[in-house]
Amino acid sequence: MAVHYWFVVNDGENRCDRWEVWQNKDTGGISWGHLHQNIMPIYNGVGNGESWQEYVWEGENAQRLTGIIEESKNNYPYCNIYRYFPGPNSNTYVAWVLNQAKINYELGIKGIGKSYPF
């Protein structure tokens, strides 16, 4: 029925972090309300499905995304609000990051919350 998007920031050497918005606040890893870093391993699926790699950004786009993701703990407007429908939720977060980075990438139709206004 729906998917749960998140980001993995991997510098290729020392660091690999999973960033996502979760329905519960302060659930694990490092958190800022509903925004979590490393709440679970990077390849763990959510719900009853397995995870998959949606897209890989490299170079300048990856650097821009990384900066926005790492600063999202201070800038994401919905760290303390979560609603499954219509949002804001995990997909709102991913759409917000992509928008901030000015990356034109369309999340799938099952990304409920991706169109929530920010």
Image: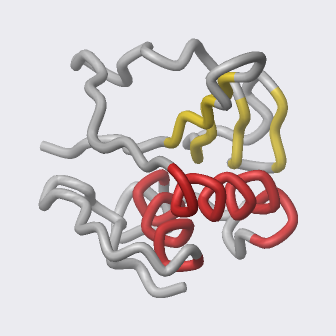
The C terminus appears in which quarter of the rendering?
bottom right
| Image-based side of 15 in relation to 89, left or right | right
Q: Is there any visible trace of residue 80 in the rendered image?
A: no
Question: Which of 55 and 58 lies nearest the eye of the viewer?
Answer: 58
Q: Is residue 2 left or right of residue 43?
A: left
User: Is 42 in front, or is 30?
Assistant: 42
| Left or right: residue 81 compared with residue 91 | right
Q: Residue at x 64, y 38 (%)?
A: 24
Please identify the residue farthest to the bottom as the structure is shown: 117
Judge whether residue 19 can be spotted in this image: yes
In the displayed structure, 74 sits above or below 18; it is below
Give percent across and percent down for residue 81: 66, 64
The quarter holding residue 51 reads top left
Please determine whether, in this image, residue 7 is positioned above or below residue 103: above
Residue 63's x, y, as percent?
65, 56
Q: Position of residue 66 (x, y in %)?
A: 67, 52
Badge count: 0
Residue drawn 27% across and 60% down? Answer: 112
Q: Residue at x 58, y 47 (%)?
A: 21
Tell me which residue sits at (49%, 78%) in the image. Answer: 99
Q: Nearer the viewer, residue 40 or 2?
A: 40
Residue at the front extreme? Answer: 59
| Display coloring | secondary structure
Residue 39: quadrant of the picture: top right
Q: Does 108 appear above or below 86?
A: above
Residue 113 coordinates in the image, percent (x, y)? 35, 66
Quarter of the image where the N terminus is located: top left
In this view, 49 is above or below 22: above
User: In the picture provided, is 51 more to the left or to the right than 59?
Assistant: left
